[in-house]
Image: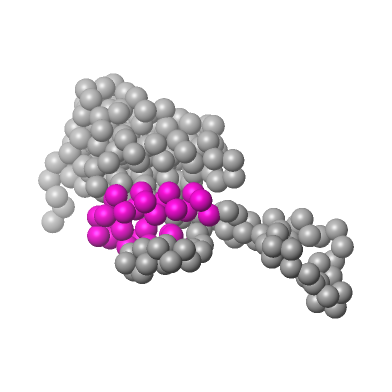
């Protein structure tokens, strides 16, 4: 797939956002993060789709087949907006796949940079997937402050629901950085949001075996602070 895309680029064949997104999926599967960045640069140069691109080339239409006549007067802008609405999610998918590819390759700074690019983008907006990937990148890079900032911005500034994974990434980043009190606070808040229903049972015993090591340590601290018992063993 990547060879085919490269050949199409060399022959100056126009590629759409969907083709780039598909190729980035192949990059993610094979760990080719540098190739993924090259594809993303190509995607950035792809203009948004237009209903009447041919008109820019001065193509003359007969009155009987003019595409404008096929659309009710006054609705052209609405139809054009619908076309762009289809393109937007595909471009966002491509960005998410690029971020995932970079994060898997340990390129945490580049991953966070792509989230910042999405946040500043005039038409695209980051989603849960983008924030989650960026927070795990923060955890990789020891950027606990940025992870905590993104968690708050995601919830309050961008109005996107936080998830179990966003809290896991941020708690792990704080725990590894020695920010134990903040990690305990975040785990407690996540539990109140019912994101960790498997953390403790009806008798108040904390079960930490299913969590990443850093988060498990935070859970033990939270259990100690609340006077609860902790179960460290896997259930049989």
Q: Position of residue 235 (x, y in %)?
A: 16, 52
Rendered image quadrant of residue 204: top left
Q: Name the residue nearer the viewer: 24 or 64.
A: 64
Rendered image quadrant of residue 201: top left
Q: Position of residue 188 (x, y in %)?
A: 35, 31
Task: Give the side of residue 111 with respect to residue 116, left or right.
Answer: left
Q: Is residue 65 above or below residue 193?
A: below
Outermost residue toward the bottom in this view: 64
The C terminus lies in quadrant: bottom left
Q: Is residue 110 magenta?
A: no
Task: Give the side of residue 94 with respect to residue 142, left or right.
Answer: right
User: At x 41% / y 41%, what residue is drawn?
Assistant: 114
Q: Position of residue 25 (x, y in %)?
A: 35, 60
User: At x 84% / y 70%, what residue is drawn?
Assistant: 69
User: At x 69% / y 62%, what residue is drawn?
Assistant: 57
| Magenta region | 18-46
Q: Position of residue 132 (x, y in %)?
A: 38, 43
Residue 229 visible (yes or no): no
Disc tally is 0
Colour scheme used in the picture? one colour
Dominant secondary structure of the residues highlighted in magenta in the image: helix
Q: Is residue 23 magenta?
A: yes
User: At x 43% / y 59%, what residue is drawn?
Assistant: 21
Q: Is residue 193 above or below residue 85?
A: above
Q: Name the residue nearer the viewer: 173 or 230.
A: 173
Q: Name the residue nearer the viewer: 218 or 96.
A: 96
Q: Name the residue nearer the viewer: 215 or 135.
A: 135
Residue 112 visible (yes or no): yes
The N terminus lies in quadrant: bottom left
Rendered image quadrant of residue 72: bottom right
Task: Give the side of residue 104 with respect to residue 50, left or right.
Answer: left
């Amino acid at each position: 797939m990547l060879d085919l895309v490269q050949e199409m680029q060399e022959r100056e064949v126009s590629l759409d956002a969907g083709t780039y997104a598909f190729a980035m999926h192949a990059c993610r599967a094979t760990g080719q993060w540098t190739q993924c960045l090259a594809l993303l640069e190509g995607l950035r140069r792809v203009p948004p789709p237009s209903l009447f691109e041919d008109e820019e080339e001065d193509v003359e239409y007969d009155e009987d087949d003019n595409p404008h006549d096929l659309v009710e007067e006054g609705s052209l802008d609405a139809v054009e907006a619908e076309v762009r609405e289809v393109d937007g999610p595909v471009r966002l998918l491509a960005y998410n796949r690029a971020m995932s590819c970079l994060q898997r390759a340990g390129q945490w700074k580049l991953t966070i940079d792509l989230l910042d690019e999405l946040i500043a983008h005039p038409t695209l907006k980051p989603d849960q997937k983008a924030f989650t990937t960026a927070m795990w990148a923060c955890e990789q890079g020891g950027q606990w402050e940025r992870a905590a900032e993104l968690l708050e911005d995601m919830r309050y500034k961008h109005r996107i629901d936080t998830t179990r994974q966003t809290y896991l990434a941020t708690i792990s980043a704080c725990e590894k950085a020695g920010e134990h009190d903040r990690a305990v606070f975040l785990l407690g808040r996540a539990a109140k949001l019912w994101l960790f229903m498997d953390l403790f049972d009806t008798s108040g015993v904390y079960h930490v075996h299913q969590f990443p090591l850093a988060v498990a340590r935070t859970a033990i601290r939270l259990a100690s602070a609340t006077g609860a018992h902790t179960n460290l063993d896997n259930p049989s």
